[in-house]
Image: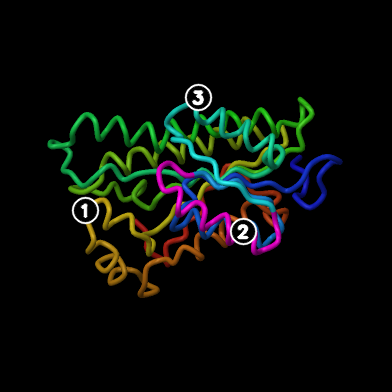
Amino acid sequence: MSLPQDDLPPGYRKTALVTGASKGIGAATALAFAKEGYDVCVNYSSDRRGADETVAACRDAGVRAIAVGADVADQQAVRAMFDTCDELLGPVTCLVNNAGIIGGTSTLPDLAQEALRRTFEANLFGTVYCLQEAVKRMRTDQGGAGGAIVNMSSLAATLGSPGEYVHYAASKAAVETLTIGAGKELGPLGIRVNAIRVGTTATSMHEREGNPDRPRMVAEATPMGRIAQPQDIADAVVWLASPRSGFVSGTILTVAGGLAP
């Protein structure tokens, strides 16, 4: 059984590692954890300035926070990131696998091999690499304190995103299957694993990926009449990591304003 995050063994502090936390959902999530009293390891790939801003906001909330650069698709870099977190903050008690890419807009026949490879490396392989390192530190059968892992999926996993992001949708569907299996495998080790199926969110990702009109179109089709704000997702992540969801594992929580397949 996973220990409540506010009732950890001696020598442990509530520590969250959030990947892709230099902007958008990741930054909002890191700050939400800081406000809940977690020390925070802010991962980034290239946006050091954004990561430093996230760290400053977390520290303003009264906790310890650090920025650690690592491409989650690089297993050695992931190992080094967790080692740095161990040294400066302590072992993680919550991991949020938020880092990911869309991999560009493309029809399936025109999808480039490099885009496919990079999308799965970032979205699926990176999630696995981070999960593996977190489990080493959390598992109660080897002296860990237990913990919670939250993976980021997407509504695309159920919609398929035809003509736009089929490769991205497929990578997120794989993340959901991973979440279900990991929840079952790791529950006896004191680790809960869940995922959030994220609807379109007000971040810069779609503009960066070449589809700036998508948020407006999705908002028009969403029953609640808008797309998500990063805080909507962050609040759900913190709940899944908290003792308030202590009997929830292997579950995919959809946060999409009522929009469904």
Q: Which mark is residue 58?
A: 2
Query: Total of numbered circles in the picture?
Result: 3
If you read the primary sequence from the N terminus, does the residue marked by circle 1 or circle 2 appear first? 2
Query: Magenta segment, which residues?
Result: 44-63
In the orientation shown, which residue stands out farthest toward the right?
Answer: 10
Can residue 150 be seen?
A: no
Disc 1 element: loop
Name the amino acid, label 2.
Answer: Cys
Q: Position of residue 120 (x, y in %)?
A: 35, 33
Task: Let me know if residue 46 is in the magenta part.
Answer: yes
Helix, strand or loop under label 3: helix
Task: Give above or below for 74 relative to 198.
Answer: above
Q: CA distance from mark 3 to mark 1?
A: 31 Å
- Left or right of residue 169: residue 175: right
* Label 2 Cα crowd, 10 Å radius (few <14 / some 14-19 / many 20+): many
Q: Is residue 55 left or right of residue 4?
A: left
Give the amino acid at mark 1: Gly
Are circles 1 and 2 on residues that touch, CB within 8 Å? Answer: no
Residue 46, quarter of the rendered image: top left
Foreground disc of the pair 3, 1: 3
Frontmost residue, 119 versus 89: 89
Q: Which mark is residue 76?
A: 3
